[in-house]
Image (tube, rainbow, N blue to C red):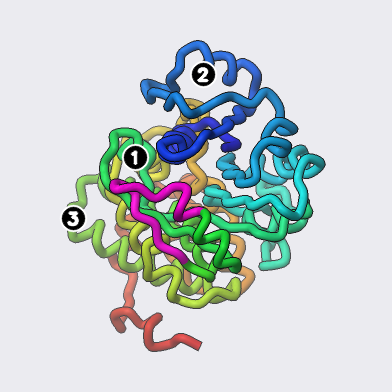
């Protein structure tokens, strides 16, 4: 396991129920604290988890590797890990974000050529062939508490799916498989910005009907963005799409949901991000998807409104009122327009 954030530790503990796990943390200070406390933020560390001081230790001692680090640092991590990998390794990542080759503070347009999923980064930076991803309604806090959950392991290689399922499945953690790794990755990324908007609606006390409206229209927006990037609708309608969307848009323990909730209380985005201990991928995703929707001329009102709220000082209440009135005359029109 590469990454010792809340989700990385939750998955590491699940893996440790049936396997020995070698864990790498980003900084020596973090590693020393984990070793000393035998816990991470009140989350006990399973006795089958051991600690790696270098990425070399991971590459030389593990055949199956789970990278779970923020998207903005993912490529750098893979570059550093690459010398210790060979084509026989299997990597299953669980990072829900995009890698981009533009400066997000000074970009004009972003197209498919400017973004990579994490599996594409792995393919570009390493010799690894068998790559997978893990995505689904997997709130770390609930996994930590032993509550039931499920995930999708996606890969073009059936042996990756089978090994991932065998390694992590338990009576409280169900696993599904998919060969549509690109679609599954996109679903996991795009739902994050919908969760920010849903948190804002919740914080404004607009009710469950309004939240359901936004989630449903958010699904349509996700599908249209996904199609523009080359995906089909199926991945968005399964566990990694609508399943993850419902969980992330319903729980204050979701980092992205909590960003929207705090925006609704009048906090500034800069103060929110500064105070967060872990990354809310949806903040970065809003910048990327807004530019993508403009390049591909996609109607995507949720991402445009949230971008203006977060970066152009549009009052949140005004933006949400606009979304609640935005017309969509045909229900589930994306099911009728599949190309």
N-terminal-most mark, 3 or 1: 1
Q: Quadrant of the N terminus?
A: top right
If you read the primary sequence from the N terminus, does the residue marked by circle 1 or circle 2 appear first?
A: 2
Sooner in the amino-acid sequence: mark 3 or mark 2: 2
Q: Position of residue 224 (x, y in %)?
A: 48, 74
Which residue is at the front of the view, 262 or 18?
18
Q: Residue at x 67, y 67 (%)?
A: 112
Q: Residue at x 71, y 39 (%)?
A: 59
User: Which disc number belongs to residue 143?
Assistant: 1
- Dot 2 falls on a residue whose secondary structure is helix
Q: Nearer the viewer, residue 246 or 173?
A: 173
Q: How crowded is the residue under tag 1: few (<14 C-alpha within 10 Å), some, or many (20+)?
A: many
Q: Which residue is mark 3?
A: 208
221 within the magenta span: no
Q: Range of the magenta residues? A: 164-177
Residue 84 or residue 69, whichever sits in front: 84
Q: Nearer the viewer, residue 143 or 64?
A: 64
Query: Is 140 left, or right, of 145 in this rendering?
Result: right
């Amino acid at each position: 396991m590469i990454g010792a954030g809340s989700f990385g530790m939750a998955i590491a503990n699940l893996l440790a129920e049936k396997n020995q796990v070698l864990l790498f943390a980003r900084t020596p200070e973090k590693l020393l604290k984990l070793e000393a406390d035998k816990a991470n933020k009140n989350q006990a560390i399973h006795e089958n988890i051991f600690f790696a001081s270098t990425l070399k230790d991971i590459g030389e001692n593990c055949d199956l590797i789970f990278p779970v680090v923020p998207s903005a640092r993912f490529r750098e991590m893979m570059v550093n890990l690459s010398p210790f990998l060979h084509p026989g390794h299997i990597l299953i990542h669980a990072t829900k974000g995009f890698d981009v080759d533009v400066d997000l503070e000074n970009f004009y347009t972003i197209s498919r050529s400017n973004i990579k999923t994490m599996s594409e980064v792995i393919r570009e930076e390493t010799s690894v062939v068998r790559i997978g991803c893990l995505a689904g309604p997997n709130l770390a806090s609930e996994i930590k508490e032993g509550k039931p959950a499920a995930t999708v392991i996606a890969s073009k290689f059936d042996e990756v799916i089978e090994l991932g399922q065998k390694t992590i499945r338990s009576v409280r953690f169900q696993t599904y498989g998919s060969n549509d790794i690109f679609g599954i990755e996109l679903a996991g990324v795009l739902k994050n910005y919908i969760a920010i908007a849903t948190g804002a609606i919740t914080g404004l006390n607009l009710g469950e009907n309004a939240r359901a409206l936004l989630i449903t229209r958010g699904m349509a927006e996700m599908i249209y963005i996904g199609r523009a990037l080359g995906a089909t609708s199926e991945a968005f309608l399964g566990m990694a799409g609508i399943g993850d969307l419902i969980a992330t848009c319903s729980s204050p323990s979701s980092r992205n949901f909590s960003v929207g909730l705090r925006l609704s209380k009048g906090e500034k985005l800069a103060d929110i991000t500064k105070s967060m201990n872990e990354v809310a991928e949806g903040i970065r995703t809003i910048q990327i998807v807004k530019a993508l929707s403009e390049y591909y001329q996609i109607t995507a009102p949720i991402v445009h409104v949230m971008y203006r709220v977060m970066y152009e000082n549009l009052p949140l209440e005004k933006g949400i009122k606009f979304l609640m009135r935005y017309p969509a005359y045909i229900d589930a029109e994306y099911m009728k327009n599949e190309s």
